Structures are given as C-alpha cells and as structure tokens.
Amino acid sequence: MLAFIIRRLLQSILVMLAVSFIAFSLFNFTGDPVALMLPPEATQLDREEVRKTLGLDQPFYVQFAVFVQNALQGNFGISLRLGRPVSQLLIERLPATLELATTAAALGLLIGIPLGIYTALKRESWTSNLLLTGSLIGVSLPNFLIGIFLILIFAVWLGWLPSFGRGEVTQLGLWSTGFLTESGLKALVLPAITLGFYPVTLFMRLVRAQMLEVLRADYIKFARARGLTNNAVYFGHALKNTLVPVITIAGLQLGGLIAFAIITETVFQWPGMGLLFIQAVQFADIPVMAAYLCLIGFIFVSINLMVDVLYYIVDPRLRTDRAGGH
Amino acid sequence: MNPPLLQVKHLRIEFPTRRGILVAVDDISFDIAAGEVLGVVGESGAGKSLTGAAVIGLLEPPGRIAGGEIIFNGKRIDNLPFEEIRKIRGREIGAIFQDPLTSLNPLYTIGRQITETIETHLALTHAQARARAIELLNEVGIPAADKRIDHYPHQFSGGMRQRVVISLALAANPKLIIADEPTTALDVSIQAQIITLLKKLGREHGTAVMLVTHDMGVIAETADRVAVMYAGRIAEIGPVADVIHHPQHPYTIGLMGAIPNVGDNNERLAQIDGSMPRLTAIPSGCAFNPRCTRTADVPNQRCTTERPGLMPAGATRAACWLHAKQYVKQNEALPV
Amino acid sequence: MSSITSLIQGCALTARGGIDMVALVNVVDSFRRFFDGDVWYSFRRNPLVILATLAALVGIIGAAFAPWIAPHNPFDLKTLNLLDAFSPPAWTELGKPQFWLGTDDQGRDVLSTIMHGSRVSLVVGICAVFLSMVVGITLGLISGYVGGSVDAFIMRVADIQLSFPAILIALLIDGVARAVIGKEHHDQVAVYVLIFAIAASGWVQYARTVRGSTLVERNKEYVQAAQVIGRRSLAIMFSHVLPNVMGPVFVLATLHVGTAIITEATLSFLGVGVPPTQPSLGTLIRVGNDFLFSGEWWITVFPGLALVILVLSINIIGDWLRDALNPKLR
C-alpha cells in the first residue's frame, strides 16, 4: 500500500513538473516580458536593469528552478491586466469556482448514476430510449448555449432567477460562500444546472454502458444460475462491478468541471477563476494564465491521487495482490 | 419404475435473425435418471451448451425455446414464470460453467458468494449458512477452508476456483447439476482432479449430472450414458461403453476414429472430411449426409430427403437410416 | 526450410507491388460489404439516423453553397440597410417577409449569416479533425512500432494531456498565440490558430487507437518476414494497420467533428476564436447574446439552434456508426 502510494506520488510530482515547465515556457515563448512591463519610451538601460532584477540574464534552467521555487510559495508574480499579485486574485476567486463545480458534480452523480442504472436495466422501455436520445442532445449542446437558453427562459421570460453574479455572499475567514443566503442560492441554480448538464448525461451514458457490459459477464450469468433474485443480481453484484471503473472517470470529470467552469462563468458572469482566466487569455495576461494552469494541474493531480487510493480500497484484486497464493 | 428426474421432449431452440430463423437445437429428446451422469458431446455449435442453458431457463435472448417440453421431477419447467424458475435454479438444478476465472464475482469474497446462495434457498441463519459454506469448501477439497472462505477469487488458482464453483453449485443440494465444459479452461493436470471430484460428489449426494463437453475422454471417465450431438440434433445416444466401443452412427464412428489410442500403430488418425454445417445451411434429410461415406448404402437417396429419427441400433439408438429395419438385413453386420 | 523461403518470397511479393492491389480490393470489398451488410441494414431501419443524415446534409450543403444560395449577402455593406435592423422573424407581427428569421443589429439577414457562419464552423471543425487525425495516426503508429522510450514518452504526454479538458488546451494555445503574434496581426491568422488549437487538443484518441492496433500487427509473421529480408516494414505496416483501424478511426473522427465544432463555437463565444469580420456560429451567438435582455431573442436563438441541430445530427450519426461497426453489440 505504502509503496503504491509513494510510486503514485512520484508520478504526480513528475506531472506537476511537466505542467509547471509548460507554464514557465509560456513566459519564454511569449516574447520579452520586459517589453510588456515597461512603457515603450523606456531606455535600453532601463531594460537591462529590469532584466537583471527579474533574473532573466540567468541560464534557463536556473530561471526554471526559481520559477518552481516561487510557485511552491504561491508566488506567480503580478497580473499584467489588474496589477495585483496573481495568487491573491486566485484565492479570492477560488471559492466561487469550487462551490459551483461541486454543486454541478453532485448533480451529475445524484441524477446521472440512477438514470444510468435505470436505462441499463430497462433497456427496451421507451423512457430509456427517450432518456438516451435526450442525453445525446445534452452532449451535443454546447455548454454556453444551455446557459443562454436557461437565461432566456428563467431570467428574461419568466423572471424567476437571476442571470448573473453570485448574489449575496457571506465571508467565512478567507472563504466567501454563497450557500448561506437566499440570493446566493438562487444565483447558483442556473449556473449549476448549466455546468451539471454534461456530467449528468456523461454519468448516465457511462454507467449504462458499463452496466450492460457487466450484465454480460459470466459471473452475472452464474449468479442467475445460482437462483439469486433479480435485486441481488442487479444491486448486489452488477452495481458494484459497474461503479468501480466509473470512479476513475468520475474523478477526472470532477477535475474537468473546474476547468470547464470557464464557459459557465463567462455566460453568467460568475466571479470565479474561470472568468479571471478567460479575461487573461483575451489580454494575454501570461502570469495569470501560468498560475491558473499550475493550479488546475495541481487539482487534477490531487484528484487523480485520491482516485487511485480509492480504487485501491474498492478493488480487492489490487489490495491483496500478494496476500493469497494457491 | 420411477419417472426420470429430467425429461426433455422434442426440444427446439431458435434464434430469430433478420435473415430468418436459425434453428440451433432441432427436436431433441432425452432423459436423465436420478443420480445418473449423462454426457452430452459434440463439436462447438452442435447445440449442447444451449440445451443445458434451456434446462435452467437461462437461454440468452434472442434465443428462445420454440417447441417441446422440459419436465423436471414430474413438473413442466420450460414455461414457468420468472420467480418460479428462479427458485428452481440453484435449489433444484445447479450449474457449473466453463471458465472458473470469470464465474466468480471478483469483488466479493467466496464466502459471501456461497452464503448468499445458501441463504437465498435454505431457511438458515447467517451463522449456519457460513458453517455450511465452510463444510462445502472442505468437501470440495479446499484446504484450510475456514480461513480461505474470506479470500477473494483472484487469490485462488484456476483449479481451486473451479472447486469453489462446484461448491456453489452444490450449495443448496440440488438434484441435478448442469456442468457446461467444466474442465475446458483448466490445465490438463487439473482436469482429472476436477472430474474425479465431480463424479465423487455426484455419487455421494445422489446428484444427477448433465455433463456438456467436447472432450470424449472426460465422458468416458465420468458418464453413465452419452448423447452425441451434431448440428442441433442427437446423432446417437446410449450407454457410454457401447457408444465408445460399438458406435452405430457414421458420425460417432468417425469421432471415435479421431481419438488417438496409445496402443495403435496407425500413422494417421482417422478424420471426417469437411466440417459441421452452419446453422444457416443445414442440409435436408440427415444433417450429416454431405460428410457421410455411407449414404450410398441407403437406397432411394433417403439420407438427403428424409430426416432420420433415433432408432435402435446395436446396444444404442442412432439417428441413421442404415439402422432402419428394412435395410439392416441387406447391410448385415456394420463394421466398427 | 523451403516453406520459410516461400513465406518470405510471398511477403516480398506483397511488399513490392501487391499492396496497391490488396488495398484496392479491400476498399471495393468494404464498399460491397457496406451496402449488403449489416451497417446499411441498420441504417435503413433507424429513422432517427436517417433524419440526422438528412439534417446534416441540409446543413452542409447550405453552408457549402452559402455564397450562391443564401437569400442575402450579409457581408455586402451596400445591400445592408440599418432601417432593417432588429426585424423579428417573418411570421411575427412586425416581421418583414424578406427576412425569414429576422435581422440582427446591423440589419443583416439572420438566415444568411447562419449559412455563412456554418461554413466557417464546418471548415474549422473538419480541418481541425483532419489535422489531429493525421498527427494522431502518425504518432500512434510510431509509438506502437518503435516502442521503448519513444512509446513511453508519447503515451505519457498523451496521458497528461488527456487529463486536461480540450477547451483549456485550446484556450492556452490561443492565448499564447495572441501573446506571440500580437493583437494587430492576430485577426489575420486567427482561423489557423484556431484549427491548430482544436487539433492539438484532439490527437490523443487517434494515437491510442492506432497504437493498440499497431502493437498487435507488429508481432505478426509478415512484418517479421519483411524484416528478415530487410524491407522497410514501417511502410508495410502502415498499409496493413491502416485498413484495420479505419473503422474505429472513422467513428472517432465523426464524433470528433461534432466536438470540434462545439469547441470552435465555444472559443468564438468566449471571444478568442474567429474575428467578428468572419463570424462563425459561435461568434453570432456571442453577438446576439448582448440583445437577449432587450427582447431580440432571435439573433442568438436561431444560430444556437442551427449549431445544436448540426452537432446533434453529426453525433447521432457517429453514435450509430460506433454501434453498427461494433460486432460485439450487434
């Protein structure tokens, strides 16, 4: 177990190094940062000065080491657009994005998995076919369009729900939450549905496909031959085997949602990291882009690590690899 | 005399496809007495596994029973509602499948899988069920059964896993076990052990066994009687010694000739030319006629026009016109 | 001994001149199988797929011939009249009969902008898919054939990339391109950057599929025999592996076109895609979005619907193809 986790940890560090290298190269590829930072009328001498204070005269591996060192301390420099420390900006925006993403993920799991089981077990029923066709529409609908249609219906035509912002937020130390006020919860509804649409359809299709595969397995046929009831076969045997591989993809998707929130946040002007990032892309605000990339990478790697450990706990084949024998 | 434990009468299994209906099993009849081991042998695709699946009501759609009856213990079971047939499965008729590696759910301990089967069928407390599970594991020869019961399937070797599968089939003490190729996926050295075990347990529990296999050697060692299937029909059925030593159907004769014999000096094994017809193209008359060397001995091209039923032939019964009474006189002794 | 020689000669023959014939026969054969086979049968029996195919064809033809068949030319400033701006659809009370789906803020006919916009969306989508297909197949083949550290490296990169959403990678590439090229030149090359960005985020699946198939093929006798006689087995494998993976790759590509169009629309909606002078469906939706609250819903809803119908029909076809070509599910 320990060896497994250490191996995974080393791999994660490697991935993080690769990601931070990409983030670091963003600076180098995108022309002269000095030119970006100084007014056009600056002299050659000014430039040299800045270059030296930034350490840009050093060889690139030294620069990379400095970059990693700074990144580990949460120092990603100053936003070109907003003139404030990037880490501060990200920390301010993080709660909004995380609250949105977790709500959407919960929707995906709580609605998607039961629907997937239903459509797998009631394969021939017309509700299943309707749901499946519906899920294809869900996959084909671009995220921003769902948002626009929801705004049109529930904000413009019906006027029930707000169409932008986070509503009233409560400050709990560093964390600002929208869960505690009515307007905060109301503001969350449309963005969460928009962002949750894809995970719902994805989990439904995934669970269905996996369950159909499992239902064809020999041990299911054997379980039937043993005279087990349908409930025991479906929920005692098939479901657990279905959900094990789903864990991996679910984990990856949760990470994906945080990045995917960029679109939803833009549509609803939701003040999260995604909105910050998209504005950074439009303005070529490299420090923000690099920091966002590193943060997303970190979230991904952590989730992956958790998924691996979870997998290890759920699947006995991994857990007791050497314990048995013949 | 008691009625047989299992009677299969004129069973017909079909697969509707868009190119028409495939008849995978066509009008077969046989029965199994209590405690008897019936071997069912044939090439893959001959319909032997489907027959086994039909008996426990586990034909996979779109396959369906299109005719005939299956009578178990004097009661017709092929048209029972789901809940009724489910209660028979495991309780009255157990099953063992080909691949022990995939027959057990990898995510549960074998103990859980055995006790769950016992509790489904017998009114026992959990502790009693567990005690019985350990007893069963002991019986099928799992050493240190009280410890091994909490292990997962992947912690057992292939042979051990098949023993676990057998204990699962026996869990509720059924009267009949359908064993579908129980040794095919195992090492040759393990096969004999499993067969011996199956035979021993069958005898001890008085359990009848329908042993489906393509391995004539397994049949010879285990079965009391044997049914030879060809293209969804029974070609020959009879006591195992007679079928092996004095086969009467040309297909069986060819089959026996294809088995290597240690004492023989023949350079080549006999072989039957051609291959079993696809289900889409079963010839009219006797399904074996295109490959048969004896069609010329039956007058009026009857082999290609009229399907033979099972008829007495020597000590067995064979579906071959050579044994129709009016020709036997002309052909006199059949070569073996 | 003689049998080995003849095996090698046989392979050499195939390697020298036979390939084209074999490939040709394969193609003809697959067409024949297609039409009297299960795929065609399941197509005819599936009304949803037929409908989707028709919708996709209408969309593609409408887009391809937009300059000739669109009712108006939305980019010809001479024909535009600001008095026509914000006309609602023709069937509403204030609608004008010559503008079926109404007009936008500049008096452009919405139907015509949709047709022109689909053109941009489709071109970007298809080019991106083609590019990532070529890159993915090549890398997958190399990865599977060369093996070792090259394989490990390519697959590691693929793994890492796969754990990031495509949209994020496309956004990053676009952002970098903006910084490198500078804003003033960016508009001219925006379409190419977009194609590259979308393609770069999609090659992994092709590479994985092809690699798997290559690994199987590499150990077959003809490759080893070809190596014995010193032929360039990579080229031979290419012609053997390709037919084997064409099915899955085709399915991937079909579904990928849908995804690529969505990615393009999303990027354009986020304002980092194609420039407004050359609007795609995503740009149109973005522009229309500003008028949502003032009641001019048609400016954004119709391009949105066009996008959904186009992508949905492509996805339905792709989904069906996957099932139809997968013998396990038949």
Image (spheres, rainbow, N blue to C red):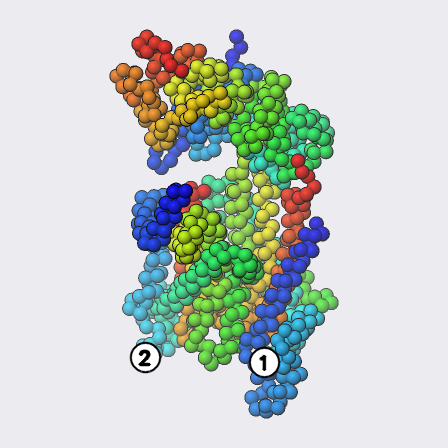
At a point 57% along the width and 28% down the height, the residue shown is B191
In the image, residue A47 lies at what x, y percent?
61, 87
At a point 54% along the width and 41% down the height, the residue shown is A214
In the image, residue A109 lies at what x, y percent?
59, 51
Which residue bears the numbered disc 1?
Answer: A33
Quick one: C299 or A16, which is closer to the camera?
Answer: A16
Q: In which quadrant of the rendered view does residue A174 lie?
A: bottom right
At a point 66% along the width and 59% down the height, the residue shown is A10
Q: Mark 2 belongs to which subunit? A: C
Q: Residues within 10 Å of mark 1 (few under 14, many from 20)?
A: some
Q: From this viewpoint, which residue is outermost toward the left?
A: B300
Quick one: C292 or C35, which is closer to the camera?
Answer: C35
Q: In which quadrant of the rendered view does residue B121 lie?
A: top right
Report the amino acid beneath label 2. Answer: Lys
Which residue bears the numbered disc 2?
Answer: C78
Quick one: B67 or C214, which is closer to the camera?
Answer: C214
Can you tell which mark lies on residue A319? none
In the image, residue C102 lies at what x, y percent?
37, 68
- Which corner quadrant holds the C terminus of chain A? top right
Q: From this viewpoint, which residue is outermost toward the front?
A: C1
Horizontal side of B261 relative to C99 (left or right) equals: right
Q: Is residue A89 visible?
A: no
Q: Secondary structure at mark 1?
A: helix
Q: Mark 1 belongs to which subunit? A: A
Is residue C34 placed above or below B167 in the rendered structure?
below
Horizontal side of B39 relative to A176 (left or right) equals: left
Is residue B245 placed above or below C232 in the rendered structure?
above
At a point 60% along the width and 65% down the height, the residue shown is A18
Q: Secondary structure at mark 2?
A: helix
